[in-house]
Amino acid sequence: MAKTLKRSAAFVALGRALTAGARGGPGLGTRLAALPRMIKATASGEYDGGMRLALMTAATIYVVSPLDFVPEMFLAVFGLVDDLVMVTWLAGSVLGETERFLVWEARRKATIPGTVLS
């Protein structure tokens, strides 16, 4: 019963992320489209997401790495648990960081460039 509740809660959370745009928040498509801009702004030094992007990149490499298939072959289901934890963390990190970036980007667009005179 508890596993069913956890699974349904995960689907509800995903559904909310997918429909966030309809409620006024950034939708999943908007967040994914922000990723290249976020990477570019981080690489140019404008945005402070360097360490977070590095951790997300490392998590992605870990999940898709062919070396990670070795534990799954020998440990079966238990070998998939680390992948599940990593994918869950990665999804939450991407959603959180893209939302943070979109807020930063909106504030930046609202700022008028210039110099402050005293």
Image (tube, rainbow, N blue to C red):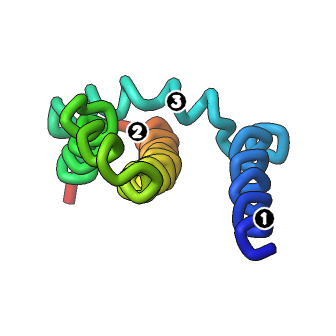
Residue 62, given in percent of the width and then of the height, sits at: 25, 41
Q: Give the crowd class for mark 3: few <14, some 14-19, many >=20 residues within 10 Å.
A: some
**Residue toward you, 41 or 39:** 39
Q: Sequence-wise, which precedes: disc 1 or disc 2?
A: 1
Distance Cα–Cα, label 2 vs label 3? 27 Å
Q: Nearer the viewer, mark 1 or mark 3?
A: 1
What's under tag 1, amino acid-wise?
Thr
Q: Sequence-wise, which precedes: disc 2 or disc 3?
A: 3
Q: Nearer the viewer, mark 2 or mark 3?
A: 3
Write down the residue under mark 2: 112
**Residue toward you, 69 or 117:** 69
Write down the residue under mark 3: 32
Distance Cα–Cα, label 1 vs label 2? 51 Å
Q: Sequence-wise, which precedes: disc 1 or disc 3?
A: 1
Residue 107, given in percent of the width and then of the height, sits at: 47, 47
- Res. 4 mark: 1
